Image (spheres, rainbow, N blue to C red):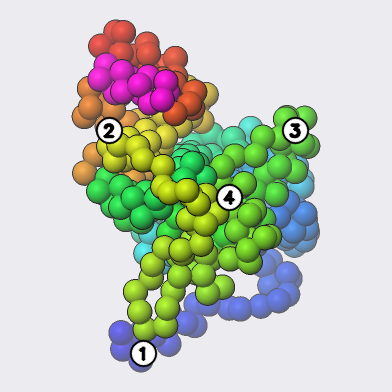
Amino acid sequence: MTPEKLAKILSLIHPTEKVEDLKGCDFIIEAVFENRDIKAAVTKETESVIGKDAIFASNTSALPITELAQASTRPENFIGMHFFSPAEKMPLVEIICGKKTSKETLAKAFDLGILLGKKPIVVNDAPGFFTTRVIGATITEGAQMVMEGINPVLIENAAAFNGSPVGPLAALDEISLETAYKNGLQAQEDAKARGEKVVDNATFSLVETMVTKLDRKGKVYGGGFYEYPEGGKKRIWSGLKNLYAKKGWTEIPFEDIKDRLVFSQVIEAVRAMEEGVIESVGDGNIGSIMGIGFPPHTGGVYQCINHWGVKEFTKRASELSKKYGKRFEPPKLLKEKAKKGEMFV
């Protein structure tokens, strides 16, 4: 761009450390670290200076909006706006309504998303919302397969064959294993606070080992599941074989590896719809492709079922369930649609 245009754009940005400078703002987007206490402090500090009609949006990928809104004196003006990284490139914004979020607040957040050039989808509140839940399922499945002793090269290649932009291990490396570990600890604390039983999933177990025992914290720290030689191409860290496959890699059909990565996401998306977290098939399809890199040629998580054929998809899910665990068991909603011959529309 021209120097003149650059100067004009930069003049619109006013960096400050003074909360008083937020006076008069109509809409605040908070994007501090994923920690409840920090977010609560920022919420209270901000609300002390903004007008009564101002909207406060939290950019969080997983923390329940209803619970974050407890720090607000105006929960009806509190909403979630989950932007995706890198925010200047990713087209999606996931808008999350808390239990007390007003329709007016939702409308303003939706309009702002469009003004920012994003594609908004609307979901209801729950841990992980929609997109984080769905992408988390395939990352956990990848971690589970590593711990089963399956060659991680095959896991990453299976994701590529499926049409995913990155594999589950590369995704964790990019996020940073340390961040994933801290998020896992926060999720455990949240579960305890809700009175729920804490169950370690494969992702947390694997990441905990990598971070706390092996000091491999991800790409930004020099290495995680991958090695990043200077001037060379990244490659899977050889230490994974010594950890989980000392006697040789576990062999399973490549088709099963591919399907485990896809079906884990799709089944989680069906559960999210069954629970009322997401109500629109279109939003689910758009969100999965634009936000978390679900294979685009499928048309999205729900269209993927339609493409397979609902009955065939349900049958294959049952097969995977028998071989690899109950997490692949077809949800009630999927079984009902298969029985009635209905598609996800």
**What is the three-letter code of the residue carrying label 4?**
Leu
- C-alpha distance separating marks 1 and 2: 47 Å
Please say if the residues under marks 4 and 2 sit with CB atoms less than 8 Å apart. Answer: no
Image position, residue 101 (x, y; %): 61, 38
Residue 215 seen in the current view = yes
Mark 4, other Cα within 10 Å: few <14 / some 14–19 / many ≥20:
some
**Quadrant of the image containing the C terminus:** top left
Mark 1, other Cα within 10 Å: few <14 / some 14–19 / many ≥20:
few
Q: In this image, 335 relative to 99: left or right?
A: left
Q: Nearer the viewer, residue 162 or 284?
A: 162
**What is the three-letter code of the residue carrying label 2?**
Cys
**What is the three-letter code of the residue carrying label 1?**
Glu
- C-alpha distance separating marks 4 and 1: 51 Å
Please say if the residues under marks 4 and 3 sit with CB atoms less than 8 Å apart. Answer: no
Above or below 204: residue 219: below
Q: Nearer the viewer, residue 6 or 50?
A: 6
Q: Secondary structure at mark 3?
A: loop
What residue sits right under mark 1 in the picture? 4
Which segment did they paint magenta? Answer: 310-323
Q: Is residue 320 magenta?
A: yes
**What is the three-letter code of the residue carrying label 3?**
Arg
Mark 3, other Cα within 10 Å: few <14 / some 14–19 / many ≥20:
few
Q: Nearer the viewer, residue 144 or 112?
A: 144
- C-alpha distance separating marks 4 and 3: 25 Å
Please say if the residues under marks 3 and 1 sit with CB atoms less than 8 Å apart. Answer: no
Q: In this image, 147 relative to 251: left or right?
A: right
Give me the disc on residue 304: 2
Is tag 4's residue or tag 2's residue first in the polypeptide sequence? Answer: 4
